[in-house]
Amino acid sequence: MRAGFIEKPGLAYYVTDAEEPQLTRPDEVKIQVKATGICGSEVHAFHGKHPYRIPPVVSGHEFAGVITEVGSAVKGYKVGDRVTAEPHYGCGECELCRKGEYNVCATKKVLGAGGWSGSFGEYVVVPEQTLVRLPEGVDFQQGALIEPLAVGMHACRVNGVGLGKTVLIIGAGTIGLGAFLCAQLANPELIIVGDVVDYNLEVAQKMGCKHVVNTMKQDLVEEVNKLTGGAGVDVTILAFGNAAVMEQAAKCTKRGGIISDVALMPNATPAPMALIQNKGITLRGSNMYVHKDYEILVDAISKGLIHTDLMITQVYPIEKMTEAMDMADKRPEPVVKVMMTF
Ligand SMILES: [Zn+2]
Ligand SMILES: [Zn+2]
């Protein structure tokens, strides 16, 4: 099959002879991929720095397409259905899986890693439980965008972002901007977005964010205090993180508030634990998402409640895998999300 292939660190290109994945279980479907996004994790894989996405690999996990084959036990879907899918599933048996928190199952499988051929290939095989139907009016590129959006949706939902709440999002890349769109949907009292790149903050503004802070030019803590009467925010979502950001987050979060981390920080990243302890802040990791996050997003996009048009900044045919990966990696021009199409 046709695919974007990462052969080894620094070398990614288009191939026509990648091994096409086949159904191995009756509950699986095969999907012809129509659009797939390049995620930061795949750029890490391209650098040989991702713990699970290890070249040589057909990676990719943000996608949408059309079902071309269904296993004998598949009940709710048929050939020709337009779908996206959550690119992970749990073991189904552990305590976490039983209560629906398969996103943190210790042995979950992730698409484009661990031998599960990913969506940079023209075909992927996934179990039925991961599927989400795309209604008319949600196109394939929007379908592929649901994955990065769902990360922010999960962080917003599990931390009670909603009416009357104040929210700070640090990091306005794909995940942070997605978190902004999800927070905006929940209509909280205040959303502040901080980043160091003006372009990203301008995108946030175009999406409707009234309070953006360039944290290189302005003091984030001061700005947050101004906007919250000195109290700090109820929820801080970290879509980017390092030691300085942890410090800002602890200072910007209200006493008794929550810091939700979706960023991939090194284990040794220091945090101001005395401040976190003294203020009674809950520091909570947020790992990917669950089915409900996808369902809410598909519904919101189909109703025009989430404007996805500013998220996709470049689109390449899969034949241009090398160029697409270069753009996502080196960013010679502003990038939010690089999309590839089949
Ligand atoms: Zn992703
Ligand atoms: Zn499990």
Image: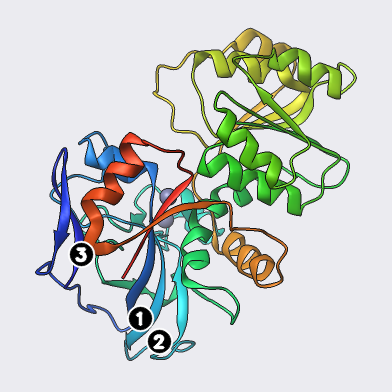
Residue 10 location, x and y as percent? 16, 38
Amino acid carrying mark 3 in the image: Ala
Query: Are the residues flagged by discs 2 and 1 in contact, CB closer than 8 Å?
Result: yes
Numbered disc 2: secondary structure: loop
Based on the displayed image, in which of its 4 quarters is residue 108 positioned?
bottom left
Quadrant holding the C terminus: bottom left
Give whichever of 184, 107 is nearer the camera. Answer: 184
Residue 161, compared with residue 265, is above or below; it is: below
Q: What residue is at 34 percent from the left and 51 percent from the top? A: 107
Q: Considering only order in the chain, which callout, 3 or 1, is on the residue closer to the N terminus? A: 3
Mark 1 sits on what residue? 27
Residue sitting at the far top: 274
The numbered mark at residue 3 is 3
Asked if 247 appears above or below 195 in the picture, the reply is: above
Q: Quadrant of the N terminus?
A: bottom left
Disc nearest the viewer among 3 and 2:
3
What is the quadrant of residue 285 in the picture?
top right
Give the Cα separation between the discs numbered 2 and 1.
Answer: 5 Å
Kindly identify the amino acid type of the residue bearing the numbered disc 1. Answer: Asp
Can you give x and y, in whole percent of width and height, for residue 178 in the image? 59, 48
296 up-or-down from 189: above or below? below
Q: Secondary structure at mark 1?
A: loop
Q: CA distance from mark 3 to mark 2?
A: 26 Å
